Amino acid sequence: MSRYQATIHWARREGEAFTDNRYSRGHQWQFDGGLTVPASSAPDAVPLPYSVAENVDPEEALVASLSSCHMLFFLAFAAKGGWRVDDYSDEAEGIMEKNAAGKIAMTRVTLRPRVRFDGASPDRAALEDLHHRAHEHCYIANSVTAEIVTEIQD
């Protein structure tokens, strides 16, 4: 078993009544390594100026964590297979909408990995297999109910 921890902190700003629902949703995520990330609700969920557009929101973080987890497994499997990866990028996207139960949820996440190799690169079937295994092993993907699609970019 592994354990992961984050500390989330929000404080009402001076002059905010709070009970009128006009308060900043800006807050901080602090992780065990000491990194602090400014966070907020998504402006789509809570309009500006009560959200902080430049901060990370939970929905973006979910999409990023799925993409990051997939990438880390992909890199591990590529290295084991003897392929040298020079660059990996992903323009991942999450879709929020009503699910089958009528609740707003992240229903689909599309990963769009673009991988550049140094020297020999896997053929299309081997590349698809690397991504399939990365998806199957990704802890985060195994933890969510949203559909996760990988669209390999050339």
Image (cartoon, rainbow, N blue to C red):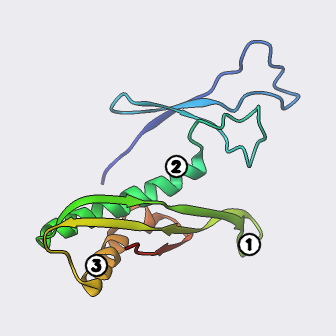
Q: Which residue is mark 1?
A: 101
- Toward which corner of the image does residue 112 lie, by quadrant? bottom left
Q: CA distance from mark 1 to mark 3?
A: 36 Å
Residue flagged by tag 3: what amino acid is it? Answer: Leu
* 47 left or right, relative to 121: right
Residue 6: x %, y % from top left: 45, 37
Give the secondary structure at mark 3. helix
Residue at 47% x, 53% y is 64
Q: Amino acid at mark 2?
A: Ala
Q: CA distance from mark 3 to mark 2?
A: 26 Å
In this figure, which residue is indicated by the disc labeled 2?
A: 61
Which quarter of the picture shows residue 75?
bottom left
- C-alpha distance separating marks 2 and 1: 23 Å
Asked whether the residues under the numbered discs 1 and 3 touch, taking CB atoms below 8 Å apart as contact, a structural biologist would say: no
Of residues 81 and 65, the one nearer the viewer is 81
Q: Residue 106: horizontal and vertical position, in percent?
A: 62, 63
Q: Which element type, helix, strand or loop, lies under badge 1?
A: loop
Type of the residue with mark 1: Ala
Q: Nearer the viewer, mark 3 or mark 2?
A: 3
Q: Earlier in the sequence, mark 3 or mark 2?
A: 2
